[in-house]
Structure formats: structure tokens, C-alpha cells
Image (spheres, rainbow, N blue to C red):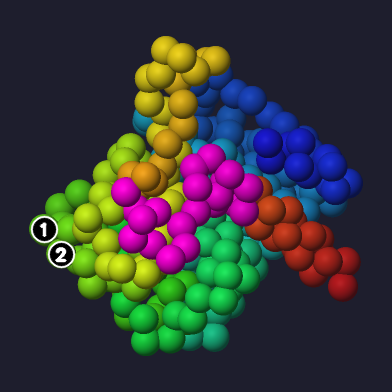
Amino acid sequence: MKSRAAEKVGIQIFDYTFPEGVEEEELLGRIAALNADDQVHGVLVQLPLPAGLDERRILDAISIEKDVDGLSAHNLGCLAQPDGCATAVPCTPAGCMELLRRSGVSLAGKECLVLGRSRIVGVPMAMLLLRADATVTVCHSRSLDVPAKCARADVVVAAIGRAGFVKGEWLKDGCVVIDVGINRVEDSSAKRGYRLVGDVDFASASVKASQITPVPGGVGPMTVTMLLRNTVELARRTAS
Ligand code: GUN
């Protein structure tokens, strides 16, 4: 989907697929070559990586000027700065912020709950909400009494990868729900034998929430769009 969307807007894609047993040095060599290639403005390493590869080392090998996914230690660290200094902000959290902004959801002083603490969504999402003056709680696999935390939240961002984990009964009336989860559940009546569902039980949550994103079709397309935006932004910066 990323490749198709990029081509549609005139961004050229160079796609490299590696076998599961690829050596870390080979990946690092490819990244170094892309870093040095003037034709390339953005480099993205699609995650998750196979076990045994050092994700942090690989993401940090991308030059900051081309870190289109914003997942390097430098760019993630920039999110902790009050003025922000990232060359690019991670695409999924950036997409969630854009959804909130365009839906007119005010965040200052609001109780925002982020479910999940991943490098790719949970942690940067929490930082972006903090920078928008929200009061932020982050829950994860070791958190206690998640339903009680949901009950307080004006905004819930679910990114834990567990199908239908958040139940409507847990939510505050009128809250806003952003569902980042994309989980496959078996469904013999579906064309592929499975269907995609989010981390939120949509049927019960949509009764309580004032606004809620669907899965599929909610956050996913925003992630792709933010990737295109980041690419154009990095290319413009190189040109100027
Ligand atoms: N895997 C699933 N979503 C993403 C994303 O936004 N960026 C990267 N790098 N990998 C992913």
C-alpha cells in the first residue's frame, strides 16, 4: 500500500526485499548505499524485523536527513524536546494527531490514555500528546486495572495488538477512540479466511464514543499519508 500510494503521487520507490535469514551487515550495507544515493530522499525499514537482528542499530544507521519514519534514536529523542527538532515524526502517531486535529478534538488539559509502549506507536504517541498539552497515561502489558484508566480517559489510543481488547463498557461517555490495532481473526465466511479487526471492540465502543476510527480504513491510510508527507518534506529540505 505504501508503494502504491507513493507511485500515485509521483514518488519513486526502490523496494528491497531480503530473506528472513539476512545478515545484519548486508542490511546495514544497503542502508549505507541508500544514505549516499542523491536520488533517495527517504529510507524506511519495514518492521518488524526477524528475530536476532538489532532493530535499534539498523534504524539508527539511516541518516537523520533520510529518516522518513522518524524512528531513529535522534528523531525519537527530539520528540522529548519542547520545541521539537525531529526531521520526521513517526507516521502512525503523526496520523493519529492529524485525525484528532482535523476532527476538532481539543487536547489541552484532556486525559489521554495510550495503550501500548512500542517504539513505533505508543512512546512517540505519548510524547506528541504531551506536547499538545494533554495529561497522558501510558498502559502496557504490566499495567494494573486498565478498565479504570479507560474510564477516566477523554481520548483513548489503542496500540497493543490484541483483537477487541478494549470494551465499550470500560469507556467514558463521549470519549474519542483511535484504534491503531490491525489484528487478523479467523473467519471462514471471509474471502481470505480471516478478517481484520482493531484493538477496540467496535460494536460496544461506538455506542459510548463520540468519535471512533474504524479498522480497517481508519489509522492505516493516515500512516501511509504521513509517510508521503514526510518524504516530500525531507525532499524539500534537501533541495533548499
Ligand atoms: N510496520 C508496520 N507499520 C510500520 C510503520 O509505520 N513503519 C515501519 N517502519 N514499519 C511498520
Left or right: 218 in relation to 113: right
Q: Is residue 99 visible?
A: yes
| Front position in the image: 101 or 49 | 101
Left or right: 170 in relation to 190: left
- Quadrant of the drawing holding the C terminus: bottom right
Query: Residue 57 at what x, y percent from top left?
Result: 47, 47
Query: Residue 89 at what x, y percent from top left?
Result: 58, 64
Asked which secondary structure carries label 2, the reply is helix
| Front position in the image: 143 or 54 | 143
Place residue 163 in its image quadrant: top left
Left or right: 134 in relation to 91: left
x 22%, y 67%: residue: 151
Q: Is residue 119 visible?
A: no
Give the CA separation, mark 2 to mark 1.
9 Å
Q: Which residues are magenta?
A: 204-223
Which residue is farthest front? 207
Is residue 208 on the magenta stretch? Answer: yes
User: Of the residues shown, which amino acid type is indicated by label 2?
Assistant: Ala
User: Of the residues shown, which amino acid type is indicated by label 1?
Assistant: Leu
- Is residue 202 positioned above or below 52 on the image? below
Q: How many marks?
A: 2
Query: Residue 180 at what x, y percent from top left?
Result: 45, 50
Which disc, if any, is residue 144?
1
Assess disc 2: are there few (<14), some (14-19) or many (≥20) residues with their C-alpha within 10 Å of its C-alpha: few
Is residue 203 on the magenta stretch? Answer: no
| Front position in the image: 82 or 198 | 198
Query: Residue 63 at what x, y percent from top left?
Result: 64, 56
x 51%, y 26%: residue: 23
Which disc, if any, is residue 136?
none
x 37%, y 87%: residue: 109
Which disc, if any, is residue 148?
2
